[in-house]
Image: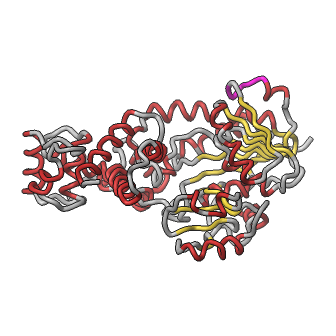
Amino acid sequence: MTPGARLSAAIELLDDIAVGDAPADRRIDGYMRQRRFIGSKDRAAIAERVYGMLRRRGRLDWWIERAGLDAKTRTRVIADLIIADRIGKSEINEIMNGGRYAPNPPSPAESRLITKLTTDKARLDHPDMPDHVRADCPAWLWPRFAAVFGEGTAAEIGALNQTAPFDLRVNTLKAERAAVLAELAPLGLGAAATPLSPLGIRLNQRWPVDRIKAFVEGRVEVQDEGSQLVSLLADAWPGHHVVDFCAGAGGKTLAMAARMENRGHIIACDISPGRIDRAVRRLRRAGVQNVERRALSSERDPWVKRHARRFDRVLVDAPCTGTGTWRRNPDGKWSLKPSDIDELTQLQSRILDSAQRLVKPGGRLIYVTCSLLCEENDERIAAFLAAHGEFSVLPVAPLWAEIIGGACPVLGEFLRLSPAHQGTDGFFAALLERAGV
């Protein structure tokens, strides 16, 4: 592909991401699947442009607005070419020449932007930028992060703006980590054991999983190290009866099933039949045989009442803002609205209130989000405990020592993981136990 064709593809994808509901990674994957003629180098270049611009959007918009223009996809692309790629007007005109597959030439207003940014010698960082702009964080979210991280806010959001590592989880139904590491070594992917999860393998680059034999044969699954740790701390054992209440495509279901050695029973629930149906192939590939899939009409589905107090473990991986996953989906920060947090926290409380009915005396309720915001984490647990006095918090450190081993990398009662501190996606987990009768 020509540079112009690559840029056109990036513009098309950025426009698609801006109006769609699916996250950026899924949009990009779908776009590439429909255009298999695009070579691997071109795919990588297009994806790098798209992800890079989403990560740099706050600073790009600051420069564009400083020049008196509206921030749109094309103006952001032009700003990115000047600021990130360090190219000038003549090179931009060569790329955006209106030729076959190339973007149309800059408009008069866009030409003025080029002149302004070039004259100002625009750089990604500028001393006049507010803190939230320099961190590429929406202004309204900055104080919410500051309430959690204080003076470390810039470092935390800076880590969320980096590229996520590519983590695999060894499926202990079929393999051991040492054997898989030896198998991956000849691929030259820098495969190494993850620092915290005893089941994790981290590659030094993304790699098509269908070219990894261990994945095709079900010996490994793609799963962030933080998600692996949450699945382990759910502490599902062989013979347990478990509900994964918001199972989605089943990543944590798979991890718990392996720990249960295919003994006992897991019910993977979700309000989207399509999501849990997508888990079928993964379950078969992994050799998992103790999982039942169940679509629920809502969090208050009658099935919940009929199965009250029957389960040893109930995992609630609640719908959330996903602020802990911005490394993978930086578009999420720009599509999020204050009203979304209000709606999600209400939904999280309703889900918790319903799911707790399934926990038997002495059983555990595990509440998980991939959010870093206090409203979705500590505040939800405080409200839940105020309404359900029969539950108490199990501090994470003793469980970590028992299940994972070694010193717990977090302080306090709850599990809090972040890219800046643990190198994982951002996760929160509260481990709650119902009093026995």
The N terminus: image quadrant: bottom left
Mark yes or no: residue 332 visible. Answer: no
Q: Main secondary structure of the magenta part?
A: loop
Task: Give the residue at x 55% y 61%.
Answer: 424
Instruction: Quadrant for residue 154, please give it.
Output: bottom left
- Given residues 125 and 52, the one toward you in this image is 52
Image position of 226 with respect to 354: above or below: below
Q: Is residue 47 left or right of residue 123?
A: right
The C terminus: image quadrant: top right
Q: Does the magenta stretch include residue 322?
A: no
Task: Give the residue at x 85% y 31%.
Answer: 307
Q: Is residue 282 left or right of residue 133?
A: right
Task: Give the residue at x 70% y 68%.
Answer: 198
Image position of 318 with respect to 354: above or below: below
- Given residues 431 and 237, the one toward you in this image is 237
- Given residues 385 and 52, the one toward you in this image is 52
- Residue 230 picture location, percent across and down: 67, 55
Q: Report the magenta residues as a range.
A: 298-302
Q: In this view, does 67 lie to the left or right of 219?
A: left
Task: Give the residue at x 82% y 48%.
Answer: 289
- Given residues 367 and 51, the one toward you in this image is 51
**How many discs appear?**
0
Q: Is residue 300 magenta?
A: yes
- Residue 421 picture location, percent across and down: 52, 65
- Residue 48 picture location, percent across and down: 36, 56
- Residue 299 picture location, percent across and down: 69, 29
Q: How is the image coloured?
A: secondary structure
Mark yes or no: residue 138 visible. Answer: yes
Image position of 313 with respect to 176: above or below: above
